[in-house]
Image (cartoon, rainbow, N blue to C red):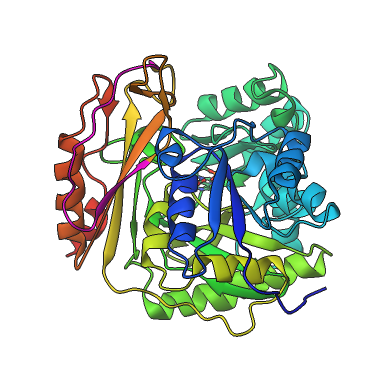
Amino acid sequence: MASVPPALPPSVLVVGAGGREHALVRALLASPAAPRVAAAPGNAGIAAEVPCFPVAVDDVPGLVALVRREGFAFVVVGPEVPLALGLADALRAAGIPVYGPGADGARLEASKIFTKEILLRHRIPTAAAAFFDAVEPALAYLRARPLPIVIKADGLAAGKGVVVATTADEAAAAVRGMLADGRFGAAGQRILIEDCLVGEETSILVVVAGRDYLILPTSQDHKRVGDGDTGPNTGGMGTYSPAEVVTPALLARIDAEIVGPSVAAIAAEGIDYRGTLFIGIMLTADGPRVIEYNARFGDPETQVVLPRVGNDVLALLWAASHGSLAGHRLIERPGHALCVVIAARGYPDAFPRGDAITLPETLPPGTGILHAGTARDAAGRLVTAGGRVLGVVAVAADLRAAADAAYATCARIGCASKYYRRDIGARQLQRG
Ligand code: AMP
Ligand code: GLY
């Protein structure tokens, strides 16, 4: 049931530990309502700005107990894992408003087969697909489909459960790896085989409040680890916003053919969705197609999208958590934002931890550093503690200036294992 949201909350807890959560913390701190902001578990950069509590994102009872003990009036959940584990349901059951869907809505990310069934049932544009839990029928289906072909583990696999196979051998190996050899464990016991979509990708983040929704500024991620979109897929190596490939006319089409129908379909499935619906879209020659839904803000999309939102983000998320966006319209700030992810060399495979980081004392105007995998060591030094370490974000009048400011700052960050792509935004910059 939608309700008129009460006065803005005096306090808010952000759940998560990445660059996305650092961006959320900063946006909430900027609210005119001046809420008390905290995070769990946070990271070294978040801890420099707000109190952090050492409760893991998958510790649902621990997080509920923390919220009660500290009296937080509102919770914003960053990552998918606690949502899939039912954190939002547990908080709502305890009477605590929360931005983020319940476990039913989080299934849109946690099960690719569940999502594909909804997309097909509601005729939302997406790639043709079939589902399998046994090797032989899957191999027979493969023989009947053209290459390249996409093989996906059904469940959550930290962004690694998707293989875009260009040869029949590669496709068969992916099928056997998931269904016979237990690669990805339970997440890969069922698989999808779907046709390969060709085009440019865009990330559409939508604030959803039941049947109400508001589309945030567009963005584009760079998922491959290497320059020129080479090497393995990662969680995301850099982003920019707006994605100008999504013209106003194309955004209107995406709204009419994908966003509106998706929000209506989710409600029709009986899901009272209150949180971000992140729609990964491929812009094919035949029109936009859904690649996937995520049940949360994107990382590192959020780092470039939120700086371009002129609304009070606390008021927007609070309203959504109460099931209505009445009176809220997007205020899109002009300008361009660009984020370069500084990773630890070796990511997304093995990478070192505990490497000392030195940050520049001053930053150019419009530039900021968001922390992801950082921590303090026993001596209090800032060190690397994850694959994606920092996000350097710059906002400027044009994308070239944003890229120049971000890259100038990347060069001034000291860290022996630092690695970053040199071509974030190149596609849009080359289009001119
Ligand atoms: P997902 O985990 O579904 O986001 O897939 C990860 C990445 O694999 C996507 O961002 C795409 O780059 C790629 N991908 C997924 N499905 C397809 C598809 N049907 N065609 C082409 N690329 C895909
Ligand atoms: N950057 C892609 C994601 O958040 O899934």
Q: Position of residue 186 (x, y in %)?
A: 75, 27
- The image quadrant of residue 349 is top left
The reply to whether residue 140 is visible in this rendering is: yes
As displayed, is residue 97 above or below residue 422?
below
Q: Nearer the viewer, residue 98 or 32?
A: 32
Q: Residue at x 75, y 28 (%)?
A: 189
Q: Position of residue 368 (x, y in %)?
A: 28, 49
Q: Position of residue 312 (x, y in %)?
A: 49, 71
Q: Residue at x 55, y 55 (%)?
A: 36
Say whether residue 276 is left or right of residue 384: right
Q: Nearer the viewer, residue 151 or 138?
A: 151
- How many marks do you count on the picture? 0
Say whether residue 126 is left or right of residue 196: right
Give the quadrant of the C terminus. Answer: bottom left
Q: Nearer the viewer, residue 190 or 67?
A: 67
Q: Residue at x 19, y 37 (%)?
A: 360
Say whether residue 264 is left or right of residue 146: right
The reply to whether residue 299 is visible in this rendering is: no
- The image quadrant of residue 332 is bottom left
Would residue 356 be counted in the magenta stretch? yes
Residue span colored magenta: 352-370
- The image quadrant of residue 6 is bottom right
Q: Residue at x 69, y 65 (%)?
A: 321
Give the quadrant of the N terminus. Answer: bottom right
Q: Magenta part mainly helix, strand or loop? A: loop
Q: Position of residue 138 (x, y in %)?
A: 71, 33
As displayed, is residue 113 above or below residue 119?
above
